Image (tube, rainbow, N blue to C red):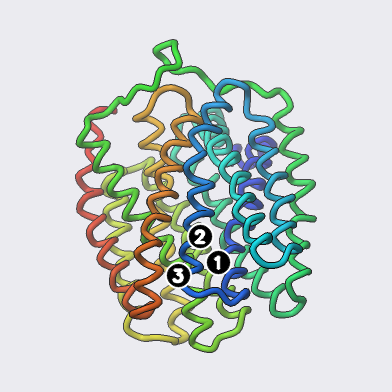
Amino acid sequence: MPLLLDSLFSSVALSHLMVDVFNSARPVLLTYLGLTETQIAWISTIYIWASALTQPIFGWLSDRVGPRWLAAGGVLWMTVFFSGAVYIPGAGGLICLIIAAFGSSSFHPVGTAQATLQGRDHLAGRETTATSLFFTAGQMGHFIGPIITGLILARLGLPAMMILPIISIPIGLSLAYQLRANKPHPRPIQGDDKIRLQASVGFILLLAIVATLQSWSQTNMISFVPKYLKDLGLSAVTYGNMAGLFMGGSALGNVIGGHLGDRYKKRKVAATALLLSAIPIFIMSQIGWSPWLYLLIPLAGAGTGSVHSIMVVLAQRMISGGMALASGLILGFIFSAGALGLLITGPLAENYGFPTVLVMTTGLVLLASPLALMLKEKWM
């Protein structure tokens, strides 16, 4: 595939993988530090909001000043403050962890816009496929991150987590080199910088609801599977592996969803994926610990993850005013909506157990499925 051989796309994708290795280390790290479900929920919510709510700002800046240091700087920012989270004990380390989230916020809208542009150039306009490949790189980071984190913490201890920042430095510098031309993203067709919504109010509301339900479902799984398995007496290696398997399944689902979204109606692909994801999630709520989780967890990830790139591409087409701005708006909304749900899920898990959360998550995807089917793209 020509896109994968493109040096800029490859560098952006590798940077996305590294950024999400940092992001996915968070739940395992917080679990290892002995925090409760409610504490994990609050810290994760603050972290995700710090990353999510500022993405439109970084996207807007990138559309005007160019992507170079907002993308590469985001990787290097996370490198510095993740290092502080590892070496500074107590509340200071947690504050550094939250500050690191701004690096993710800076990178994501810029990287998404770059991936979409490269897809238009190298895949004959198949931007959903290109965007899904970009997000797959990030989800591979989510797959690798918990596994590596669990192994490091179990065998080498907390200080050895500095391995991740050391790896990320050349990746960030390489991205800065690839973006040295620092070309601003294309201007909107209308010729000005005003934000315009090119869809009906009903479509916008439906897209927001479906994105919220999908994000809430994924965030529940990402944030609490490690804590649930630790409470069942499993080691950091095991719950790290399980968290990684969920995101590995999500990465695979993202590729499949992006490919099918370019060939068939996006709403039908999204609705089917969400419906199918309810099956493994509900089974997980009934069986407790079982070797079957090695199959069920990645299947749940594949079903919920395959919708992500579809939501982003629909939003990019819906919002004018700059590609990175549109990417930042939808990504910021998706991530912050999922984080808001954690404030409900955290106390629910602590008081009633994670199986109850899984039943609730089943309900979320079952509600999202028929709503996704209503996302008719007549305005496109």
The image shows residue 106, relative to residue 124, as above or below, that is: below
Q: Which residue is mark 1?
A: 27
- Where residue 282 sits, quadrant-wise, is bottom left
Of residues 57 and 123, the one nearer the viewer is 57
Q: Quadrant of the C terminus?
A: top left
Give yes or no for contact between labels 2 and 3 (Cβ–Cβ under 8 Å): no
Task: State the separation of the CA atoms marked 1 and 2.
Answer: 8 Å
Q: Is residue 154 left or right of residue 188?
A: right
Residue at image position (64%, 37%) is 71
Residue at image position (32%, 57%) is 273
Of residues 156 and 286, the one nearer the viewer is 156
Of residues 130 and 372, the one nearer the viewer is 372
The image shows residue 159, relative to residue 132, as above or below, that is: below
Q: Can see residue 181?
A: yes
Q: Which residue is mark 2?
A: 44
Residue type indicated by callout 1:
Pro
Residue type indicated by callout 2:
Ser
Residue type indicated by callout 3:
Thr
Under circle 1, the secondary element is helix
Q: Which residue is mark 3?
A: 38
- The crowding category of the residue bearing disc 1, from other C-alpha atoms within 10 Å (few below 14, some 14 to 19, many at least 20), is many
Q: Is residue 89 left or right of residue 378?
A: right
Q: Indicate the position of residue 132 as horizontal and vertical percent values.
A: 48, 46
